[in-house]
Image (tube, coloured by chain):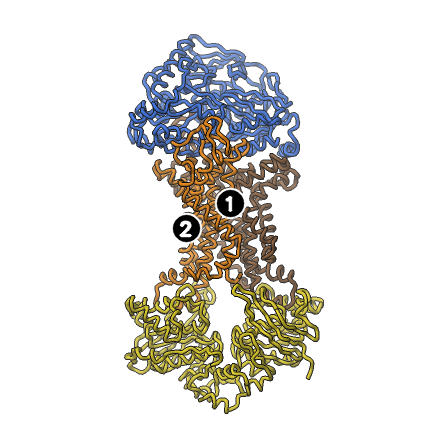
Chain colours: A yellow, B brown, C orange, D blue
Amino acid sequence: MTEPVLSIRNLTVEIPTRRGLFKPVQGVSYDIRPGEIRGVVGESGAGKSMTGNAVIGLLDPPARVSEGEIWLNGRRIDQLDAEQKRRIRGGEIAMIFQDPLTSLNPLFTVGEQLVETIQLHLGLSSSEAQSRAIALLDRVRIPNPEERFHQYPHQFSGGMRQRVVIALALCSEPSVIVADEPTTALDVSIQAQVLDLIKELARERQVGVILVTHDMGVIADTTDEVTVMYEGRVVEQGTTSQILGAPTHEYTKSLIAAVPRPQVKLHRFPQVSYGGRETAFKIEDLARNWDRSTASKSGTLVEVKGLTKRFLAKGAILPSQRSYFTAVDDVSFDIKDGEVFGLVGESGSGKSTVARMLATLYPVDGGTVTFDGEEVTGMDAKQLSAYRKQIQMIFQDPFSSLNPRMSVGDIVAEPLVHHKLLSRAEIGPRVRELLDRVGLASDAYRKYPHEFSGGQRQRISIARALATQPRFLICDEPTSALDVSIQAQILNILKDLQEHLGLTMLFISHDLPVVRQMCDRVGVMRQGKLVEVQETSALFEAPKSDYTRELLDLMPRLEQLSEEQIAELRT
Amino acid sequence: MLSFIVKRVGQSVLVLLVTGLVAFSMFTFVGDPIDNMLGQERTMEDVERLRAQLGLDKPFVVQYFRFLEQAAQGNFGISYRQGRPVAEILMERAPATLELAAVSGVLAIVMGIGLGVFTAIRRNGVAANLIMSISLIGVSLPTFLIGILLIYLFSVELGWLPSFGRGETVHIGGWSTGFLTESGLKALILPAITLGLYQMTLIMRLVRSEMLEVLRQDYIRFARARGLGDRVVNFRHALKNTMVPVITVIGLQLGSIIAFAIITETVFQWPGVGLLFINAIQFVDIPVMAAYLMLISVMFVAINLLVDILYAMIDPRLRAAS
Amino acid sequence: MNRFLDSDVFYAFRTSPVAIVSLIVTVLMVLAAVFAPLIATTNPFDPASLNLMNGFTAPMEPNAFTGESFFLGTDDQGRDVFSTILYGLRISLFVGVAAVMLAMVIGIFLGLLSGYVGGWTETIIMRAADVQLTFPSILVAMLIFGVAKGVTPVEYRDQMAIWVLILAIGLSDWVQFARVVRGATLVEKSKDYVAAARLIGRSPLTIMIRHILPNVLSPVLVIATISLALAIIAEATLSFLGVGAPATQPSLGTLIRIGQGFLFSGEWWILLFPACTLLVLALAVNLLGDWLRDALNPRLR
Amino acid sequence: MFRLSTAIALVLALPASAEEFNFAVTTDPQTMDPHAVNSAPVLGFLNNVYEGLVRRGKDMAIEPSLATSWSPIGDGEGWRFVLRQGVTFQDGSAFDADDVIFSYERASSEQADTSSWFAPVSDVIKVDDFTVDIMTSAPNPIFPDSIANWMMMDSGWAAANNAERPDKEQGNYATLNANGTGPFQIAARQPDLSTVLEPHAGWWDEVEHNLTRVEMTPIQNSATALAALLSGDVDFINPVPIQDAARLQGNPDVQVIQGIEARVIMLGFDQQSGAAESGQGASDMFLDARAREAVAKAVNVPAILQTIMRGNAEVASQLVSPAMRGYSDAQAAPYAYDPEAARALAAEAGLTGQTISLKCPNDRYLNDEAVCQAVTAMLAQAGMDVSLDAMPVSNYWPELRADNFDMYLLGWSPGTFDAEHPIRFLGSTPNEEKRLGSWNFGAYSNDRIDTLLPMIQSEIDDSVRQGMLDEVAKIMQDEVAYVPLYVQPLVWGARANIDVTQRPDNFFILRWVTVN
């Protein structure tokens, strides 16, 4: 076994806050060998990124390394002064950030940023540096690099930018790369390519890679070794196969269990039971006083015909001068009463736009939406308000979907107040009840959103959505911003709603495994067009279109999982 | 890019028209020139005759349009007070104000940006906080008071610098400059400081906050992660991004410097358009006032147009967009 | 309340001596202004109470003719400088606050409107802002003064002067509020809680007032404090130029204008004390606004 | 121009060298045309460039200038002037009777602002090249006194530069250039910036001054002007802010020259009946003489002079100062300060409870606004509620013309230095075609005065004339037509090494200046 390029010994990071000393990382130790990829996995706040920052010496003050040692190629670096640390940074250790959109300086060409880094570390002449930079761009598979060299970041797509970032990381022939959630912001297809690239480069250049991620799928596909972190501590580490194959620690088990499986459809999502995070969702009580009287005549609740949406791409005074971009192009499907209809597709495929048109948030440019036999497009104000009473929406980002300046009570009450469904006196108790049902403590009523975790906020949104006892619920990527464990809880809640209350749902997601678990039927969208619509199982077993097949292939899997594990999950 | 410029120019013209209207309507209220133009023993006929000659008896709208069409040809009429073409007087006075404004503008921008960057980088340093606090005194004292105190200190008590006027000027073509003579430069110091101080503090504080904003961005952290030194990060990457929002504000500031010069010029008896304007107001010299206001707005609009273009040049995203 | 005491802003405040001091100073000044009639030894606005022979009495020295002596001396009219400053402070603060309020209301409204509605509304409002910016408050004030003079009956001239000041400063100050609010609105507008409200069927007005407004207030607050200082100074400058508070009911600016005439003649106190008061007030408010800017900007903490 | 600026440079760099003389004034003379604008700054300055047939000496007495002698024709048909020979204009051309005729036509023309001076004149006749007869429609004993500021312009020069008539609106060559017979000629002029004078080599009179170059700079801000004097940037300023006089006297580098101006500061009243005429100053409160007397008794003039004027002025009892011809010694006693009586009178006249609007300029007379404030306070103490409205002079006159006042502050300096002048403009009933009472804003009217005025104007016998003047003064005092407050002081400031001569008309005469 070769010597580790980087070894972290008993690393502890502390942040002095007004409420005492907070330790985001405690006694973490691990090694990275040349050409090896170590995945560091855990939920947000587990301290995985903090470790990476500590290694590269980029902790934002007042955070500091309080204990432990960091050794790089046999030399201790945690105690070096700022200047020496700087030289190592981007030299022997390079870094890749999560969001390619923000990690490049918008005012400099890609070339300038590459050349400056290369010259800094390798001291080449500008012409040499330039040719080297172009070579790098070519290496990270950016088509016609000579031309791209002179372009600005905003002229690159997300995936391309992340490749540029990688190229930047490679400028100085580093021996270690810290990649912090390098693919989280990317679409599945891009994600796969970028991960492959990283793998390949690690092997080829014998670079040790620390791959920080929350995605078990990524771990499974990419890493050799895994470190599982929980609340600042390492709970378990070892080779990827053994961690995924035979996890010993409870947390690891639950974490793995929580990952949605594309292969099989399970009744419920296995929830992370570790640390007693689960909070009860009292669906029965909710179901008791839910009025289910209204069922649609036809059996089809929502009918979408030739739906089209165009956005202004280039404005001008003369209509003739304006140019448009078609986000949704002649999309047609229908949703039966009480079914969960899924829409999958990559970002920009127009799935969210469809959702927002159904929710009357966007005006429709073409086609019709029919709800329970009534044509929504072209309703007058009164009918619209009646329609809105029956539909509700759950948004992707639990942080922006709740007004930070309104108390949770007011937020949940707002629909009731607006639609005058209850008298002032009744509203209060009703809201409290709702909050209690979705599993929030009674004091939630007075609190403000920022006092809740992401999962809890999603519960608040659900409470708000249920306030009007809607018939149709639109879920726009409801869990993509959450950790796996929380994701499981929320998805289960949605399942319950659908089963016990007979809610009809439109479920938007880019995450195929989740879709497989949630939906009865699925539509696949690409560039504003609906590629195919099928029963979920049929779609996953025998996709009709190549695009769907492609998507399915790219889907990260946990092959290492043995059949019996799945069996045991099934129960 | 071109269409962008064309659009802005169009808007600018619109702005000018409205400005002209407001400017002009102002004068119907500030007094009556006749009494100033006639002496102690004037009679009613004199007044009426003069009124008619000046067209002051015409309805306001008529006066305005006459003014507009004249102004369009660069003809702002004859000054009631000096009996000379206003354009000529302006040409004569403009250099003084422009030089003053330029010097204090440069002062404000250079010092402002410099100190702003410094205080941003050394955010918690003693020096930085000191500068921030002192700078506040700058914005907390009325300009006129600063001017008077400076005069009292440097010309009366110490006798180092002239207390008023522009010193020796040299004529190059139609332009009279005080840059080429010692006395001219000495005379510039106090007024320039008085005028520039306020703008400087504003710019400095703005640069600071914008820079702090930028320094928190990912690409700055990434730049550091690439091992770039503080100097490169701060002055190459951060500063350029800071300038994007700052430039617009600086534009507005420069625009207002020329207007603010009114106060400074009164205190220092600086022979510029500001002083001209104050005299004009006291004398109700309507053509001069009108011309002055048009001049101000033209400069203001021009500067901002320039800024917009500069803006587009710095920020590639905008370039692509337009 | 507890939530406030526990909040980070309050914590930042507790730990910043500058903020504490400047707040105390500001509060003291405001109190002094509000309770001027109780604190002041004389009422300088009541001409009947003045004795001209008390004119130009130096601080703490008995007057040559009347033998009376005054804490901060008297001005050319025999007014007790200390009392006059208190009353002047009152006017300055009132004008400042009222002007900022006016600017705020106009600015916020137009800002929200242009930000949320966009399109032509936005273009028009923003162009209007440009026009506004070409007119420094001095000119605006002179314009409004002229108009007002024509329309107000003479008995109300003195009171009018103050309202004109407010109007003039307020009108020349709304632009920055509008710009900031518009910017913030554009950001908030795109957030999902607005979408949620629209989905519920809330009217644009309700959304603007109930949802967006509370979320754009903190930058507004910062600007408000800073432009309060600016407004006070603007008032001083206008009064200095003669278009401002009348000499019979002087504001700090008017006092400075009067005192400036005695800069060389040895009656330093007529200028010095009002000037210092103005400086301290503006400084305190500025420091406060400055601190507020940092404190309310979460990313800075 | 460049020479001029070099000169400023020298001045600014080092203290003024012996013959260089720089002075600052508050307002720049708005024209160089002696007939275009009849105002003190213009006439005062042009007295150094142009000359009249007669001029005033250091004691204000009339003395020969371009006329060597003059005498009445018959019993008051007019006056004969004998012109001085060998006088040349600054452009070298000679001065003779034709120039006088031309200057009469020009100065009395419709476009001229000085035409009213010649109201009494029926004709001007050239007897020979150096004799001129000026015929008057009625006997006019004081005519020579009244034309001291009537300045002679060269007909040829005017014709050559087609400036035969003054032009106030458009301006013409004579607005920026001058060509007089006086001791100084204009070397360079930039309105509102600077005006440079040089001695006129061919001047007829013998030279007292030792100046080789004079520059005048207008500085409005009195603090700046004072600073300029103290720092030696200028050698002379007029006026010195009155409050600074005492301090300056203590300063060895500078001197203060004080005196009494011909200008009397007074309070006027709205005495027209009916709201119609009396604009915003609502009611007819001051039609009642007792009301006016109340004001007269309520104002403590000595106190004002003591504090605001720093003891630099004298109480006035009538519309002219003792220095003026025709001053009435009989009426020398000013109103006595008596607040109690004032309070009683005010009550009787029904002033109490009404708001009196007092109009006041704030940039016209020395400390004008401060004085009005003091008056406001004093009236308040006598139970009268006054609302003071001070404004720049550009708004002030229109305001008075619109009758928007109950009371107003006015300063009057008789151009003829004769008591008849204020009667003509302030005392007699306003009358457009007779050009009488044109500054009698309050429309004070008394038939006796109206009948006396023409008699005074034509009376040759001084004692009889004085009798009539006394009568008028008495009437106006008894009826409290105006409340004369004080005679405005003159306060000039100069560097210690400068000798100047001050005249009550506040004209700054350069030929009496010497730099030591």
Q: Which residue lies under the disc numbered 1?
A: C280
User: Is B17 on the left or on the right of D246, as rendered?
Assistant: left
From this viewpoint, is residue A198 visible? yes
CA distance separating discs 2 and 1: 22 Å
Q: Within 10 Å of the Cα at label 2, are there few (<14), some (14-19), or many (20+) other Cα atoms? A: some
Residue matched to label 2 = C101
- Give above or below for C12 relative to B134: below
Residue A24 location, x and y as percent?
56, 71
Q: Which of D473 and C143 is in front in this view?
A: D473
Q: Where is residue D440 in the image (x, y as percent from the top left)?
A: 37, 24
Q: Residue at x 70, y 75 (%)?
A: A74
Secondary element at image label 2: helix
Q: Which quarter of the figure has residue B28?
A: top left
Q: Please state the total of marks drawn on the protein image.
A: 2
x and y, in percent, of residue A418 in the image: 32, 66
Amino acid tagged 1: Val
Check disc 2 and give the amino acid type: Met
